[in-house]
Amino acid sequence: MSTKSKVLVTGGAGFIGSHVVDQLMSEGNYEVMVMDNLVTGRPNNLMHHGEAVILINADISDSSSWQTLNFTPDYIIHLAAQVSVPASFGDPAYCHRVNVSGFLNMLDFARVSKVKKVVYASSSAIYGDQGERRISESDAPNPLSPYGASKLLNEWYAGKYHEWFGVSAIGLRFFNVYGPRQLNDSPYSGVIAKFKHLIQNEQPVTIFGDGKQTRDFVYVTEVAKAIELAMLSPASLNVFNVGTGEPCDLTHLAEIFSSVFGRELVLQYQPAREGDIRHSLADVGKLKTELGFQSTIDLKAGVRLLTSTEEEK
C-alpha cells in the first residue's frame, strides 16, 4: 500500500485555500492539515470533508504556532496572508507582520522539517502598472502598495532560503482570482464577488475609476489545479504567473453580469483608489510550457458557474 503524501495548507479554510484542499482530497493521495487563524477563513468551507481534514486554528505570524505544530509535511502550500491592498495602506505594519514575518516563520519550519517543496501565493501586485501589454515573469517588479511589496519580499526570501538552506519553493503570481466562497462584503472582497453581491441585492455597482481599467480574471478551481501542478513539478525554485491571458475591463465585466442575471445594472463611478493598478494582464506562456497548465473557463462561463454553484447551496 502506498503512503499518502502529507500536505500542510496555510489559509486552507479561506477562499483559494479551501478549493486547494478540495483538489487535493479529490485525488485521494494526500493527508491534509489546514492551518488558519479564521479571521477571513471559514470552517464551513471544509465541513464537507468531515474528519478527513485536520483544521488547526493558529496564526502564521506567531512563531509558537509553528513550534507546537504536530505535523511533519512533505509539502507546504502557503496561502495565509493579509490580501487587501487598501487594508495594507491602512496598516502597513500589520501587513508586514502577517505577510513577511509569517512567511519567514513558514520558511523556517520548512527548513527544519525538510519538506520536499513549498508552493506559495505571490501576486500580480508585485508588477505595479505595466501598461496594457502582457506581463511576463521576467518583467521588473514595481509594487504600488505595501501588499505588493510584501509579496515581492516573499519571493526574495524564498530565493535566499533556497540558496542558503536548499528549501525548494515555487511562487505563483496570482492575477484576479474569483469563484465560490470568496468574501463579498469585506475589504478583502474581489471585484467579481462585490459585483455579484450588489447585483443580487439590487444595489448600484460602484466602479473605482473610469471603468476602462483591465484585469485578468481566473476561476478558483483552475488556480487550485495550477497549485497542485506546481507542487508536483520537478522545479526547485521558480515563479509563475497564474491567469488566463485574457483581459477584461470593468465596464465589460458589468455587461457580462447584466447578461448573466438578465437585468440592467446601475453603475456608479468613484475616483480611483490609492494603489489601484490600471491594467493587469498575464503572459501565461511559461505556466503552459513548464507546468502544462492552460485555463479552459472563460469569464462569462465562470460567472455563470459561480452563480449556479452559489444557488445550489
Image (cartoon, rainbow, N blue to C red):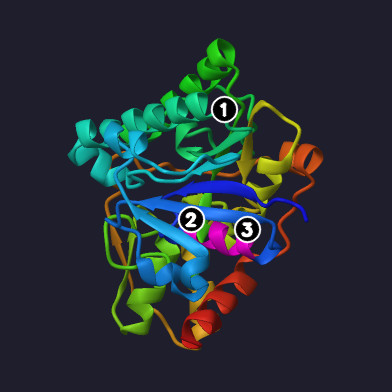
Which residue is under mark 3? 24
Secondary structure of the magenta portion, mostly?
helix
Q: Quadrant of residue 116?
A: top right
Residue ID at (31%, 58%): 40
Quick one: SS at disc 3? helix
Which residue is under mark 2? 17
Which mark identifies residue 114? 1
Work out whether residue 81 or residue 203 is closer to the camera in this orientation and state it. Answer: 81
* Left or right of 208 in this view: 234: right
Task: Give, as a three-letter code, the residue at label 1.
Answer: Lys
Which mark identifies residue 81? none
Could you give the CA–CA distance between mark 2 and mark 3, rounded to whole angstroms? 11 Å
Q: Percent x, y for residue 279?
A: 50, 43
Task: Give, as a three-letter code, the residue at label 3.
Answer: Leu
Magenta part of the chain: 18-25
Instruction: Give the class, few, some or many, for how many residues have Cα within 10 Å of label 1's Cα (few <14, many ≥20).
Output: some
